[in-house]
Image: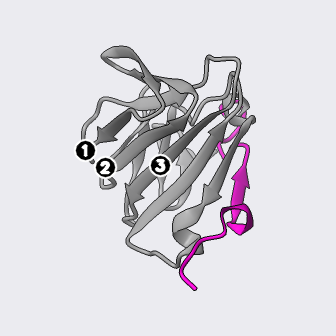
């Protein structure tokens, strides 16, 4: 059977960021749909953001492209260029290597659901322009290389 049972897919709740950066992502849930299908070249997640939750810290990837589509509710897309409201049916894409960091914030009073799709390069690194943090294949570190 190829149908993915969404409610049975692996769930990643909350945030994996080190303290104190994890706090803004505590009210989120990612259902790992790509993994449930056995995909290895790109990831697909169903992201559920409770009111006030962030998708993650504002970031950009060195190797991985990302695409998001709002399935229900609305979120605010925040980049270095400013803010845009995305509603159900709206999409956005982020090219690997584009240093304009991004993230989604649910400022509404209702649950927002977003489909996330991204490539899965094992050697991808991630930069967090608003905070002293980078993500590497070995984990999170400060900009000077000191691990969290």
Q: Tell me which residue sits at (74%, 35%) in the image.
A: 27
- The stretch in magenta equals 1-21
Circle on res. 116 = 3
Q: In the picture, which quadrant includes the N terminus?
A: bottom right
Give the class, few, some or many, for how many residues have Cα within 10 Å of label 3's Cα (few <14, many ≥20).
many
Q: CA distance from mark 1 to mark 3?
A: 18 Å
Picture coordinates of residue 62 (x, y %)? 31, 49
Instruction: Please report whichever mark, 1 or 2, sits nearer to the chain's N-terminal start.
Output: 2
Instruction: Please report whichever mark, 1 or 3, sits nearer to the chain's N-terminal start.
Output: 1
Furthest residue toward top: 82
Q: Tell me which residue sits at (31%, 51%) in the image.
A: 65
Picture coordinates of residue 88 (x, y %)? 48, 32
The residue to which callout 1 is attached is 97
Q: Nearer the viewer, residue 71 or 22?
A: 71
Circle on res. 62 = 2
Q: Is residue 46 left or right of residue 67?
A: right
Q: Secondary structure at mark 1?
A: loop
Q: Tell me which residue sits at (42%, 28%) in the image.
A: 129
Q: Is residue 113 above or below residue 96?
A: above
- Whether residues under marks 1 and 3 lie with C-beta atoms below 8 angstroms apart, the answer is no
Q: Is residue 136 left or right of residue 21?
A: left
Q: Nearer the viewer, residue 93 or 110?
A: 110
Picture coordinates of residue 142 (x, y %)? 53, 38
Give the class, few, some or many, for how many residues have Cα within 10 Å of label 2's Cα (few <14, many ≥20).
some
Q: CA distance from mark 1 to mark 2?
A: 4 Å
Q: Nearer the viewer, residue 11 or 130?
A: 11
Q: Is residue 55 above or below residue 5?
A: above
Q: CA distance from mark 2 to mark 3?
A: 17 Å
């Amino acid at each position: 059977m190829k149908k993915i049972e969404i409610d049975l897919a692996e769930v990643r709740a909350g945030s994996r960021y080190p303290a104190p950066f994890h706090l803004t992502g505590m009210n989120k849930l990612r259902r790992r749909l790509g993994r449930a299908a056995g995909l290895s070249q790109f990831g697909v997640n169903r992201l559920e953001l409770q009111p006030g939750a962030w998708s993650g810290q504002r970031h950009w990837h060195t190797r991985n492209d990302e695409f998001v589509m709002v399935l229900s509710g609305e979120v605010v897309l925040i980049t270095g260029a400013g803010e845009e409201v995305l509603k159900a049916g709206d999409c956005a894409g982020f090219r690997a290597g584009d240093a304009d960091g991004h993230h989604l914030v649910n400022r509404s009073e209702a649950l927002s659901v977003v489909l996330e799709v991204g490539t899965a390069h094992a050697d991808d690194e991630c930069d967090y322009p608003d905070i002293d943090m980078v993500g590497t294949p070995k984990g999170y570190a400060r900009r000077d290389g000191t691990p969290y």
